[in-house]
Image: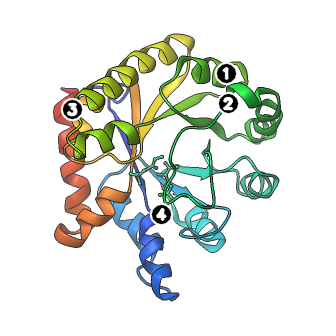
Amino acid sequence: MTSDEKLRLGINIDHVATVRNARGGDTPDPLRAAQIAQEAGCDGITAHLREDRRHISDADIDGLMDMLTVPLNFEMAATEEMQAIALRHKPHAVCIVPEKREERTTEGGLEVAREENRLAHFIAPLREAGSRVSIFIAADKRQIEAAHRIGAEVVELHSGAYCDAHHEGRINDRDRELEAMREMSSFAHDLGLEVHVGHGLTYETVQPVAAFPEVKELNIGHFLIGEAIFRGLNPAIAEMRRLMDEARA
Ligand SMILES: CC(=O)[C@@H](O)[C@H](O)COP(=O)(O)O
Ligand SMILES: NCC(=O)COP(=O)(O)O
């Protein structure tokens, strides 16, 4: 397999910070998790600085920028505060995500089509600063076209509905969601966008998505951080890598 064909694995460390914040202290340290993920051979680290700072903190982002040897994919809402933070750090990638204070997790994709003008102006300085701009969206043609028009280089398709349907045994819904991601990966790729997929992926759900040839990167966090409790972070990541490579081959 050439390095071009290799599917990249980004490890999301948000939920190490969730556990740390449950007690308000310093442990477990998300930076230590990032270090172990790097040693396990991940291709990038993803961290989402939420407006309410419920998991990742500003200090975590400062620390990641200092210690990472792999690219940082900085997830953030399209707010002025976050834009200023991203422009200060200039991470490898900025992924614009929707955010609601009251949600438990990122429920859906960003509404790009109805906010095209604002988002085009919002992402322009990020691109000029050298960050690759990615937009976190549902597998929806209208949103992909809008992401392309505003100048995004990457779209990350939200795999949460597919994963939820699988784990709840709603097989028809699962298959429909998977088919939508397959079709939309190809559609986005044909427009010239790089395609990533993420949210809710597990050992059981990763392989059908990893097999889509147009997908270049998977971002996986919550499941792996949970799995690390039982088998350790490095082995948990190694098993995900093995499954991805098997699906790709
Ligand atoms: C944006 C996204 O996909 C999320 O996976 C996020 O990075 C994890 O954090 P939340 O569970 O707080 O949404
Ligand atoms: N953008 C998705 C991501 O980074 C990881 O999501 P999850 O695996 O924590 O649900």
**SS for callout 4:** helix
Residue matched to label 4 = 14
Q: Earlier in the sequence, mark 2 or mark 1?
A: 2
Residue matched to label 3 = 171
Residue matched to label 2 = 112
In-front residue for pair 183/66? 183
Q: Position of residue 134 (x, y in %)?
A: 60, 36
Residue matched to label 1 = 146
Disc 4, disc 2: CB below 8 Å? no
Q: Identity of the amino acid at label 3? A: Ile
Disc 3, disc 4: CB below 8 Å? no
Instruction: Mark 4 and ligand 1: say if the CB distance to the nearest ligand atom is below 8 Å.
Output: yes
Q: Earlier in the sequence, mark 2 or mark 3?
A: 2
Q: Identity of the amino acid at label 1? A: Ala
Q: Earlier in the sequence, mark 4 or mark 1?
A: 4
Picture residue at 34% right of the left edge, 33% below the top: 7
Q: Identity of the amino acid at label 4? A: Asp
In-front residue for pair 64/124? 124
Q: Earlier in the sequence, mark 4 or mark 2?
A: 4
